[in-house]
Image (spheres, coloured by chain):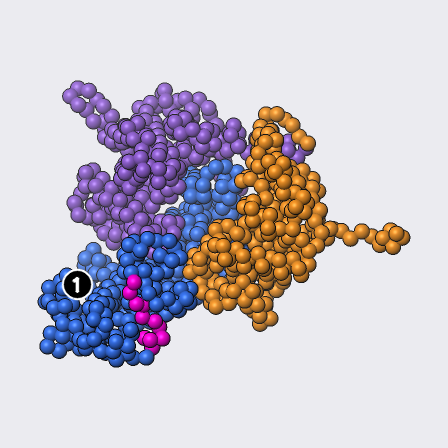
């Protein structure tokens, strides 16, 4: 519980850092790609700037289509992906995107042209058949879901490749456009495609807004939702249908292999940032849209850079930033938390040692000499002096002529730690049947993390006991509240 | 449908027999190569299925691409050695990152796999395109594989003895290695797949076994990559084992069935490719999938038809 | 008694007739008959794999049924589902799911709220009251991933309470719960019973089953016995539930395909 308190506090302080570093990484990524490009094509930097400016003005209709397209795709997929990640079905998107390939081929064969509507219908149907296969396999065989997904994914894909290779051999087919579905080619997005994307995006957003409650209920506990008479099956199938539709509209821009990244990566990033579902969905949609824009922008800077993979890389950069600098579970914040914790534990242990020394003669003397402390801690005077200086810098003790004196705050903290330790030892021996000589090490760790509420509860359960299992006095909470005199024997 | 697209007439002899008799020069090594790939993948796939790691193959096969590209850029040539090493390293890096994400973030395995494979693949594509002038990487090869091309290379000759094309020799040695590992490490593999706790107490190094399996997986996937491409490898890994689970519940027999499945799907797949005049590797996978569906419908243990029959019986 | 002849008999709260459920080839429930009236706390006990959870799920239409029927107040489940509450097993959901305790309890209201609508203030009040009843109100805004096992179980209980149902099915509500929590759950169950609700509780601990429940349903593939706890909790009947004759029945069930036997 102490951890969550600590997380809340440091999270806020880390927020600013996160944003700052995130922007820095972004800038670095934005610089790196043109650099790679410059190495490859020896393009001039001035050309890059002009190109970026052209992109930002959005005057070019081709640029506008790509921007709108990637933005719509990223948002749609991000929104749906949020539900998939929390339902642990992240790889369903992967299976779905590969399974649509035969549908693309059949849609093409339908009237021998790259007709977006025919291909959309064919691909969506194929995707749905693929997911139906996955659920039928897991229900009727002993195969686990991952095996069923991989099996359907690769088998459908193979069928699609066979059909595509057939199409390529047809004499009259204008099949040039079809290979775009494999790797994606955002530049081919036209007004027709934008219309389809906008419709799908609008339907998805309306669907999520209108049926949010049902979607969450089904995602969290489908059996319970069904037992209440909620149309769980309808909701699930509608969701899968929209998912298939979203995958299909994304195919053209990103390609079969990488579509699933649009679904998974922004949502997984959002999952690292928040534990509230509405916020997770919002972040996921925003991150998806931002990845789409970033990918479009970066690919525009170079003549031949593919948009789809750059969108995926942009989304992965967001993810990497979240893993490293996320405010909740980020690796940096964990390191930082641990360092803070280590420092605090060290100071508290020093205070405790001072308390122990002072306790021996009933707090008769005002201070504790460094030598006494060193003997107590089995350390050199030099090491102990460093600890004393640390206490002083935190306002917990004064150090005068080789003697340490508690400040009121230090005295209170020392009492608390000793109290926590002894209460916990007593609790272990009385309520958990630990032998008295076993409890010390447990208590060494617990004493630093017991919160005030738990301590009160412990005191209550132990009937405000005065003596610990080793026969020493337990300082009580009420005594610690009023500042005891430094040289008080007040405790005894 | 439009009239210009008509199914070619099916000639059983031309599709199923002729490739292995009259046209043996063309299809002989294709068959051997295809079988080696399918059998090595299938045997290893059994264990992936047992450990619910079926999709790790997906992740590894996609991450091979950036490995190849980077190795090419670093070594400056298409030498087999550096390319192989690069792909292998990339595959291992992918599995390590997945493990790391799984253990150090709240994300589950599915999300970790999805993110890692797509990121690495995207990096591979971007690098390949950015350095298109220097790299001759056919996108078709990445997805379709070049089974026909691989097997048509001139054979390696030792002295006066003509052996086999180099790719076939490589793949056959990988298959031999897989078989050797399974024979030697059968117990350790079985126990650590089934119950890691018991395995640990029995003195099996569970992490070591897992690492070894990942290494073997990377090796198999990388060797199979040029023949069947990034995605179809996944089918090769899963289909034989999945078919075997529908037919038997015993692991030793599953190995045999996986090998039979591999052989049968190569035979039928080549037939399919000859008949329809389509790509080889996808055709082999389609044939393998058809065999799987057949086992699913008619398998003696919980086949769909049997289940249907049982249900009627209980009901009556 | 002329009056009783003129008024039609009140249908029982739950009536099950010849219910048969099979999973793959193996029957899980076989010809179950049952009739239960209002205001009863019924424990369902039996060995592992006896079909306890399956019975509950079959009653609520959550699992396909091969034969027989289930009626609540003489009507099929679909017509009365808002009057039936459910506590599933705790492990069936992902407790890392990003929702708060309050969100989960509010889900108990969704059946009543209707499609497309948001929970109202009144729904929130009900949810708060239910949380209060299981002593979890201070945790209302916690993420469910931060809860202990006993707290998770009480969240599920609160969600079922929020359904304000008249019949409750509870699947192992005491599994993995400490003694204090168990006692507090029993108090809630008895309160519900005293209000006239009928509760079916899957339970696997025999000694406590005897204390907790008014009636016991001994189940192993079919109903071994059903009646007041004092009458049913006998060595003979328990022996028949947990061993002996009935295991033969389950063996026959497993070999059904070969034997070709049917009822």
Residue C86 visible in the shown view: yes
Residue A324 visible in the shown view: no
Nearest to the observer: residue C54 or residue B51: C54
- Label 1 marks a residue whose chain is A
Determine whether A244 is above or below B250 in the image.
below
Chain shown in orange:
C
Chain A display color: blue
Q: Quadrant of residue B181?
A: top left
Q: Where is residue B200 drawn, in percent x and y?
A: 31, 39
Horizontal side, residue B286 vs residue C238: left or right: left
User: Residue at horizontal 10%, vertical 64%?
Assistant: A380
As for residue A472 lying within the magenta part, the answer is yes
User: Residue at horizontal 80%, vertical 51%?
Assistant: C9
Q: Which residues are magenta?
A: A471-481
Q: Where is residue A304 drawn, in percent x and y?
A: 29, 56
Chain B display color: purple
Task: Give the position of the C terminus of chain B as an image quadrant.
Answer: top right
Nearest to the observer: residue A232 or residue B295: A232
Q: Which residue is mark 1?
A: A377
């Amino acid at each position: 519980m102490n951890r969550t308190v600590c997380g809340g506090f440091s999270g806020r302080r880390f927020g600013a850092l996160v944003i700052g570093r995130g922007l820095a990484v972004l800038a670095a990524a934005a610089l790196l790609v043109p650099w790679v490009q410059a190495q490859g094509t020896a393009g001039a930097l001035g050309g890059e700037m002009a190109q970026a400016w052209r992109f930002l003005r959005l005057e070019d209709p081709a640029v506008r289509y790509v921007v709108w397209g990637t933005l719509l795709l990223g948002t749609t997929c991000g929104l749906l992906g949020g539900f998939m990640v929390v339902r642990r079905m992240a790889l369903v998107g992967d299976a779905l995107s590969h399974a649509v390939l035969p549908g693309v081929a059949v849609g093409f064969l339908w009237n021998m042209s790259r007709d977006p509507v025919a291909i959309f219908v064919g691909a969506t149907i194929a995707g749905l058949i693929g997911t139906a296969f996955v659920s039928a396999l897991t229900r009727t065989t002993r195969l686990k879901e991952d095996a069923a997904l991989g099996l359907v994914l690769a088998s459908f894909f193979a069928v699609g490749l066979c059909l595509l290779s057939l199409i390529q051999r047809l004499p009259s087919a204008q099949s040039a456009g079809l290979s775009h579905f494999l790797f994606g080619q955002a530049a081919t997005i036209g007004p027709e495609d934008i219309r389809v994307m906008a419709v799908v995006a609008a339907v998805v957003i309306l669907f999520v807004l209108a049926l949010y409650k049902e979607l969450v209920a089904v995602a969290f506990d489908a059996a319970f939702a069904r037992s209440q008479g909620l149309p769980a099956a309808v909701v699930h199938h509608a969701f899968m249908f929209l998912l298939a539709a979203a995958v299909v509209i994304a195919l053209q821009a990103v390609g079969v292999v990488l579509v699933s990244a649009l679904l998974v990566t922004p949502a997984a990033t959002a999952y690292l940032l928040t534990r509230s579902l509405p916020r997770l969905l919002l972040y996921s949609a925003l991150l998806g849209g931002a990845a789409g824009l970033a990918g479009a922008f970066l690919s525009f800077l170079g003549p031949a850079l593919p948009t789809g993979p750059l969108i995926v890389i942009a989304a992965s950069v967001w993810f990497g930033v979240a893993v490293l600098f996320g405010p909740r579970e980020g690796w940096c914040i964990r390191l930082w938390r641990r360092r803070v914790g280590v420092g605090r534990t060290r100071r508290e242990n020093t205070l405790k040692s001072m308390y122990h020394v002072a306790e021996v003669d009933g707090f008769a003397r005002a201070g504790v000499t460094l030598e006494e402390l060193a003997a107590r801690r089995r350390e050199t005077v030099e090491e102990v002096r460093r600890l004393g200086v640390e206490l002083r810098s935190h306002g917990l003790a004064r150090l005068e002529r080789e003697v340490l004196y508690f400040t009121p705050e230090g005295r209170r903290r020392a009492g608390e730690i000793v109290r926590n330790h002894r209460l916990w030892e007593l609790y272990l021996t009385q309520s958990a049947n630990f032998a008295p000589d076993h409890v010390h090490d447990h208590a060494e760790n617990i004493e630093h993390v017991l919160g005030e509420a738990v301590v009160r509860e412990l005191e209550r359960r132990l009937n405000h006991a005065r003596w610990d299992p080793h026969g020493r006095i337990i300082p009580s909470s009420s005594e610690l509240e009023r500042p005891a005199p430094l040289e008080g024997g007040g405790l005894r | 449908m439009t009239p210009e697209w008509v199914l070619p007439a099916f000639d059983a002899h031309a599709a199923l027999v002729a490739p292995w008799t009259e046209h043996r020069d063309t299809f002989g090594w294709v068959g051997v190569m295809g079988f080696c790939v399918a059998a090595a993948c299938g045997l290893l796939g059994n264990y992936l299925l047992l450990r619910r790691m079926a999709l790790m193959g997906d992740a590894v096969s996609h991450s091979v691409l950036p490995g190849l590209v980077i190795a090419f850029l670093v070594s400056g040539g298409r030498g087999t050695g550096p390319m192989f090493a690069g792909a292998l390293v990339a595959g291992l890096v992918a599995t390590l990152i997945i493990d790391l994400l799984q253990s150090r973030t709240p994300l589950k395995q599915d999300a970790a796999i999805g993110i890692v494979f797509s990121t690495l693949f995207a990096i591979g594509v971007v690098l390949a395109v950015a350095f298109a002038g220097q790299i001759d990487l056919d996108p078709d090869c990445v997805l379709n594989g070049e089974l026909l091309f691989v097997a048509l290379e001139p054979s390696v000759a030792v002295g006066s003895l003509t052996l086999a094309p180099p790719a076939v020799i490589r793949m056959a040695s990988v298959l031999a290695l897989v078989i050797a590992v399974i024979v030697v490490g059968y117990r350790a593999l079985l126990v650590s797949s089934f119950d890691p706790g018991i395995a640990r107490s029995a003195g099996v190094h569970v992490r070591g076994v897992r690492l070894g399996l990942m290494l073997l997986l990377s090796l198999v996937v990388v060797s199979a990559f040029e023949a069947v491409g990034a995605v179809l490898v996944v089918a090769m890994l899963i289909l034989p084992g999945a078919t075997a689970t529908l037919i038997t519940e015993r692991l030793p027999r599953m190995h045999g069935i996986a090998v039979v499945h591999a052989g049968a799907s190569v035979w039928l797949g080549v037939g399919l490719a000859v008949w329809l005049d389509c790509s080889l590797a996808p055709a082999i996978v389609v044939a393998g999938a058809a065999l799987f569906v057949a086992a699913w419908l008619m398998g003696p243990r919980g086949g769909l038809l049997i289940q249907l029959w049982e249900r009627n019986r209980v009901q009556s | 008694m002329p009056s009783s002849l003129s008024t039609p008999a009140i249908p029982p709260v739950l009536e099950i007739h010849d219910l048969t459920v099979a999973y793959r080839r193996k029957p899980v429930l076989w010809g179950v008959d049952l009739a239960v009236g209002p205001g009863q706390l019924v424990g369902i006990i039996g060995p592992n794999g006896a079909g306890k959870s399956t019975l509950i799920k079959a009653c609520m239409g959550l699992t396909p049924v091969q034969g027989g029927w289930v009626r609540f107040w003489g009507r099929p489940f679909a017509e009365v589902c808002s009057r039936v509450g459910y506590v599933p097993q705790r492990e069936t959901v992902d407790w890392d799911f990003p929702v708060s305790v309050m969100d989960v309890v509010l889900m108990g209201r969704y059946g009543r709220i209707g499609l497309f609508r948001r929970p109202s203030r009144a729904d929130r009040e009900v949810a708060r009251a239910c949380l209060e009843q299981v002593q979890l109100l201070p945790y209302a805004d916690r993420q469910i991933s931060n809860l202990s096992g006993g707290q998770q179980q009480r969240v599920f209980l609160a969600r079922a309470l929020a359904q304000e149902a008249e019949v409750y099915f509870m699947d192992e509500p005491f599994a993995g719960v400490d003694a204090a929590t168990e006692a507090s759950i029993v108090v809630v169950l008895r309160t519900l019973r005293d209000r006239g609700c009928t509760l079916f509780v899957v339970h696997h601990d025999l000694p406590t089953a005897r204390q907790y429940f008014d009636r016991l349903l001994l189940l192993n593939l079919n109903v071994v016995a059903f009646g007041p706890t004092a009458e049913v909790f006998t060595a003979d009947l328990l022996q028949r539930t947990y061993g002996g004759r009935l295991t033969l029945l389950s063996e026959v069930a497993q070999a059904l395909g070969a034997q070709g036997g049917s009822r």
